[in-house]
Every structure is written in C-alpha cells, then in structure tokens.
Amino acid sequence: MIANPLALIAEITHRCPLHCVYCSNPLRLVTAKAELSTEEWVRVFREAAGLGVLHLHLTGGEPAARTDLEDLIAGGRRAGLYTNLITSGMGLSEPRLARLVEAGLDHIQLSFQDSKDGPARWIAGAKGHAYKAVLAQKIRQLRVAFTVNLVVHRQNLDHIEEMLDFIEQLQPERVEIAHAQYYGWALKNRDTLIPTPQQLENCLRAVEAAQLRLAGKVRIDCVVPDYYARYPKACMGGWGRRLMLIDPSGQALPCHAAGVIPGMKFANVREHSLEWIWRESEAFQRFRGTDWMPEPCRSCERSVDDFGGCRCQAFLLTGDAAATDPVCSLSPDHHLIETARLSAKPDSAPVSWLYRINAG
Amino acid sequence: MIGLQGTGQTIVELCDGRRTVQEIVATLTERYNAADPTRITEDVYAFLASLQQKRIVDFE
C-alpha cells in the first residue's frame, strides 16, 4: 500500500531576477517557452488534491515572474489546497501582493540573503534587499501567514546575531535559518559556502538564544547542516513517500535534484495523471521504501527514519545514487565529507564564486 | 506539517477566528457532557498554548 503524497512542490518557472550562488535549481534550467500553461497547472493542482495532497508550494525560480500567479493561487485554493508562495519578493508590488492574498494565498515565505544591502547584493548577484525589507512590512499588514527564510553559510554566518535581529523586526510568525545545501549551484560553490565548525557553534547558540527570547512570538527553525550531523537528513521525508515536485515543463520529480541521477526517466504531467506518476512511474518507485538499500543502511535501525539520506547527494559525491548518503558517519564514503569539512577555514582573502545564470 | 486527531482536531476545528476560548470550552463541555468545565478549560488552554509556541494559532 503506497501512502498518498502530502505536498506538491510546483516549480512554476525557472526564471528569476536573482543569481544566488547557492540556488538549488538544476544547472540546466527550463526555458520560459517550455513552461506549463495556467490551465495545465490548475489541472495538476486538482489532481493533486484528489490524490490526497494538502499543501501546495508555489516556487521557482521566482514564481512572481509568472504573470498568471494570481490565477494559479486561485486555482490552488479552489482545489482545496493550503497554498504557500516561496518568493524572493522581486516582482511583487504592494497592489499585486494584496491581489495574491485576495486570490486565496494562505502563507508567504520571503527569502533574504543577508541583513545588509551590500552582502545581500553580493550573494544574490542583484539588487533588491531594501525592496524586500519594505515588502516585508506590507506583508505584515495583510491577513496571511508569514515566514522569513534566510540562507546561511560561511560568507554571512559571522554576523548571525545581526541577521536574527533584522528578521525579528520584520515580525514574521516563523523563521527558517537554512544552511545552504550543496546541490545545483551551491555544490559548485561549496568550498566558499561551507561553514567553519566555530561558525556553526556560534550559529546554534545564537539561534537558541533567539528562540528563548522570542518564544510564543516567533517560531525559529534551524537544523544542523548534514555535513556536520552524525546521520543524514530524511531527504524529502523519504523518496516517493510524502512529496512530489513538478518542474516548470511538467516533469514530475521525487526530489529537487533528482535530474542529476543518470538513467532516471521522469514522467510528464502532460502525458500522465499525477496518480499514475505517483503510484506507477519508474522514477517514483526507484528508491521508494527500503528494498533498494545497501549496507550499512539495510540492517540499520534508522533506515525507516532517514531512508538512507539523499539519493542525489549520494550520486553527486560517490557516483552511485544507491549508496548510503556519505554524510552518514556510518557510510564507507564518509571521508569525502570529512575532507570537505577540512576545507572550511576562515577566509584570509576575498573569495569569488559562480553565480546562477538566467533561465532564458 | 502537523497531524491532529481526536479532541485536538475538534479544538482546532472550533478555532474559526470568531469564537473565544471560553466559547470553545463551553462547546466542548456541552459536547462531552462534562460536569466540571475546569479540567476542560485547563486542557484547552494548555493545548492552544502549545500550538501558539509553534505559531500555528493565535489566541488571547
């Protein structure tokens, strides 16, 4: 018996005005011409609701780059889904924001790159920080749940306290302090992003202090990044177990990065029903459950908690998508992570990095 | 994502943005035929407080 998915991640476009160095989008981006139409997306939302999905996450790229975002939100709402917009805020004017909430938006997640304009611009490869800060005030005046997301890494963690103070002023209900994860562009920039052990320790201490201070006002989520954890994360809550991602062209993926795994065939919502894709398609069955697992996962009591970690990370680091995620301290490839951690030293000279390109 | 069941689910369903906590307690007292609403009051406040910590509901 295959449980139904709980959330649909709809990457409605790969277009984005930002060029963040840790963008998790695939290195090969979907062009605007190949994107699903409004009607196609709305049909997918209805199918998802029928399949048991509760949450719809509209993301990108920058979802506001779609001029039909209002219609997509209304479509999600009509399907009965709790609708969340994951946005950089770029492309959202005050009237448009009000229209999105009017259309039925339940929750908005606004991302920041830093607390200060200069560093934020350097990380995003684009202007926009001041605009986001003003937009956050407008969001707070609307009847919509509000999460602030801040991606942290070696180049901004030295002022984590300042960033937490900045976010507190924005008055969100929830904060996500998200350590950069090394997929897509972030893997290319890993050596400049990976935090030092000292930074990580400071970060956890600062977050804990903020959690105590803001208890009942702001919920702050922050997990130890997997490169520093003993065991891997339960990526996507387990392959083909809770989440389904649809890319801008309608390809259904079990995980954001699954496209990197060689030989994977992804079904498209233009050709198949969501239910068939979830239950029958090759990609969703490939690493579902525990039968595919090698040792040490197979006999590990944690195999049903973390599902062997992330398949994409296993492939990217070891060349074998069916290997134990090397971040696990029990993995025979764990030395790869230990070596990467050793490269995490305070920077003595200015660093350079690779920016995400435009989707075209 | 948080899963609810039983009384917890009932309480959240009663949180409609209009009912006061007192009204929710009164509804539950009636529904469960409880003689003493004190226990229900305590449980409802404790439950709502735990949800507020997670910033899932607001109440005064």
Image (cartoon, coloured by chain):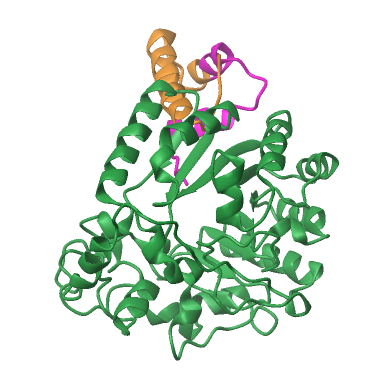
Chain colours: A green, B orange
**Residue name at image x 55 percent, y 15 percent:** B21
Q: Position of residue B38 (x, y in %)?
A: 40, 8
**Residue name at image x 46 percent, y 17 percent:** B33
State the quadrant of the N terminus of chain A.
bottom left
Q: In which image quadrant can residue A236 be found?
A: bottom left
Q: Position of residue A173 (x, y in %)?
A: 55, 32
Q: Which of A243 and A189 lies nearest the eye of the viewer?
A: A189
Q: Which of A26 and A266 lies nearest the eye of the viewer?
A: A26
**Residue name at image x 45 percent, y 40 percent:** B4
Residue range highlighted in magenta: B1-27
Q: Is residue A352 above or below residue A279?
A: above
Instruction: Tell me: B1 left or right of A82.
Output: left
State the quadrant of the C terminus of chain A.
bottom right
Residue furthest bottom as drawn = A263
Within the magenta stretch, is there residue A268?
no
Q: Position of residue A319 (x, y in %)?
A: 32, 84
